[in-house]
Amino acid sequence: MDARQTIQAGKAVLGIEFGSTRIKAVLVDGDNRPIAQGAHEWENQLADGLWTYSLEAIWNGLQDCYADLRRNVLKDYDTEIRSLAAIGVSAMMHGYMAFNETGDLLVPFRTWRNTNTGKAAKALSDLFVYNIPLRWSISHLYEAILDKEPHVRDIAFQTTLAGYIHWQLTGEKVLGVGDASGMMPVDPETKTYDAVMVKKFRELIAPEGFPWQFPDIFPKVLSAGEDAGRLTEEGARRLDVSGQLLAGIPLCPPEGDAGTGMAATNAVKQRTGNVSAGTSSFSMIVLEKPLSRPYEPIDIVTTPDGSLVAMVHCNNCTSDINAWTGLFREFAGLMGVDADMGTLYTRLFNKALEGDADCGGLLSYNYVSGEPVTGVAEGRPLFVRSAEDKFNLANFMRAHLYGAVAVLKIGNDILFKQEHVRVDRITGHGGYFKTPGVGQRILAAALSSPISVMETAGEGGAWGIALLAAYAVSNPEGLSLADWLDKRVFAGNTGTEISPAGEDIAGFGTYIERYKRGLAIEKAAAGHK
């Protein structure tokens, strides 16, 4: 079938992902190729000291994104979307969405970006002998308990953003194992919440006498390919306000952005990995065996089919670069030049490659929000130089590109240098890699490893969750997720690879040592308004 026939026959698959600044929908054909897209821009809000998105923003964003997709399908193919082979929903992982018995949200959605859960995360890490990050859902829950928040007694259901959307579309309180592993630890053998840790948490909170039992308030855990329900009549109207979309469409387990990134980069097998670099950044390395001990900068989550993954998550990546690029555009306007942002990014990124390998002594701390890996509680973007440093545009841009992945390097050095983790291929995706070769070369130097980028990397997580939805309904051979991706989607394509240059590795090494020493400056700045 061609694309129009695929849509008319109801054979297309829809993937929707809620990113930090963009909600994106991708429609794919029977060969898993994107044939239409829709998007909606949005932004989180700081309310009462906590980062959040309102329910109104969530639903307005979803409906506008789908309406944009529908308009594009009408324009490009002169047809309506009436039915689909499958739908998948993905979103930013972690955070806190707690609901009462009647389905009302008890407190505003607390996103992954919040760092107010320090007491809880430390206590749970000690209790479980397992690194429990600040942004995990169990940290948010226990922090609310420690802070004596009255709403906790009324919790009937707690989930992530993807789990919430899926619940409203299908009525099913379920979650993909990858997203669930960012709520609390998952046992890779049982592929559900770790029973020993569940027991410990029950005993910990027993004196509170809550009317609910843990983990009954958490969603049921499903692996890739399992039945996760169907679009209800109400769900169809909430997604497509035009009333064209029919109910009854199957949905795959809702997943987090980490899992969709793994699917979109074919990094589900052991000894593969991927780096997502956009507003935030994270690396995912699929492990052959558990790490020897817990490490605070490293989260242990899972692939969408339940394999252990070492995740280094950084709250900040390209936002500070975006801000500086906006400043350069403003200057260009002052000089009478109408500079296109895409052209500015391309030229500034390429200019960075002309800089000194160690950035001439310049340093960039891109901390728009707090950065737990380096122990910085609050955001305070900072550019640092001394009078002796080589201050020019090339070094300035190179320092910011280095700074965008510096925290990622600090975390991954633990994996590669202390744990001796082996990896055969790392694939990059996200806005950091949009200018060909630049971000790829710098990340290769940071991780001392070849980095691949695929032509499909720009499709991102919406395409990744579309692949997971397709896997759930078009796998008659019963292939594993890794084999299905290899054979049905990527067909051996591993993308374009760049190996690190010795000079770049040495230069980044010098930069990162200076960066670590300079963290005292960043922490002092973050401690003062």
Image: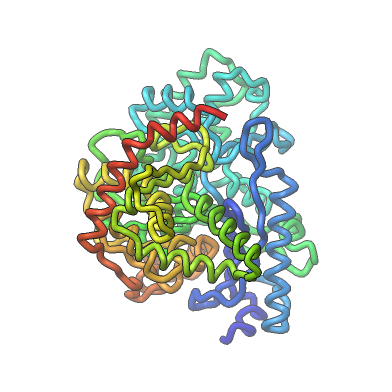
Along the viewing direction, whichever of 487 and 40 lies nearer the viewer: 40
Image side of residue 313 versus residue 116, left or right: left
Judge whether 510 appears above or below 144 on screen.
below
Along the viewing direction, whichever of 327 and 375 lies nearer the viewer: 327
Q: Residue furthest right?
A: 242
Rendered residue at 46%/48% (across/down): 177
Rendered residue at 33%/27% (across/down): 129
Q: Quadrant of residue 304?
A: bottom left
Q: Residue furthest front?
A: 387
Residue 293 visible from this viewpoint: yes
Q: Position of residue 149 (x, y in %)?
A: 64, 21
Q: Position of residue 231 (x, y in %)?
A: 67, 59
Image side of residue 435 versus residue 248, left or right: left
- The image shows a total of numbered marks equal to 0
Along the viewing direction, whichever of 287 and 253 lies nearer the viewer: 287
Rendered residue at 64%/29% (across/down): 155
Image side of residue 200 versus residue 425, left or right: right
Along the viewing direction, whichever of 383 and 93 lies nearer the viewer: 383
